[in-house]
Image: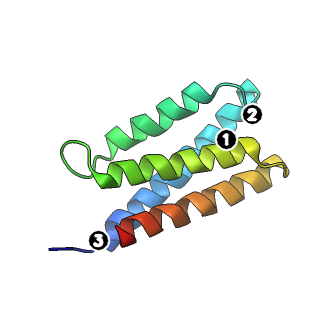
């Protein structure tokens, strides 16, 4: 039986995702946008901190993939850095909501 995720779960994970992308943005400013491994580790660490279910679940994958979208958008968008941060946070939260509601 299909069950919709609870609204509190999505709001909480959206806030964590926005915070992780904000921290990754400042890590990128200090390291010159070169160290992608630290940003990936930051997302993986946050996935395992806010475990949705025991073991690996689709929600964990959705959070990781939307976080990676945000980090890649921060890296490859050609706008000013703060505008790229806003666009990446909005795009990754929209992707997270789409993945958690549709699948």
Q: Which labelled disc corresponds to residue 25?
A: 1
Circle 2 residues within 10 Å: few <14, some 14–19, many ≥20: few
Q: Give me the residue at 55% from left, 54% from top.
A: 18
Q: CA distance from mark 3 to mark 1?
A: 29 Å
Give the residue furthest to the left. 1
Residue indicated by mark 2: 29
| Most foreground residue, 69 or 53 | 69
Q: Are marks 2 and 1 in contact (CB under 8 Å)?
A: yes
Mark before the other along the chain sequence, 3 or 1? 3
Q: Give me the residue at 77% from left, 27% from top.
A: 32
Q: CA distance from mark 3 to mark 2?
A: 35 Å
Circle 1 residues within 10 Å: few <14, some 14–19, many ≥20: many
Q: Which labelled disc corresponds to residue 82?
A: none
| 94 to 71, vertically: above or below | below
93 sits to left or right of 86: left
How many numbered marks does the figure carry?
A: 3
103 sits to left or right of 30: left
Q: CA distance from mark 2 to mark 1?
A: 6 Å
């Amino acid at each position: 039986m299909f069950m919709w995720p609870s609204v509190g779960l999505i709001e909480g994970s959206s806030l964590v995702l926005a915070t992780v992308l904000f921290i990754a943005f400042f890590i990128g400013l200090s390291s010159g946008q070169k160290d992608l491994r630290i940003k990936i580790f930051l997302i993986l660490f946050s996935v395992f901190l806010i475990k949705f279910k025991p073991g690996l679940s689709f929600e964990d994958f959705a959070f990781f993939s939307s976080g990676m979208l945000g980090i890649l958008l921060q890296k490859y968008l050609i706008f000013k850095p703060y505008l790229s941060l806003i666009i990446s946070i909005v795009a990754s939260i929209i992707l997270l909501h789409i993945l958690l509601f549709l699948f």
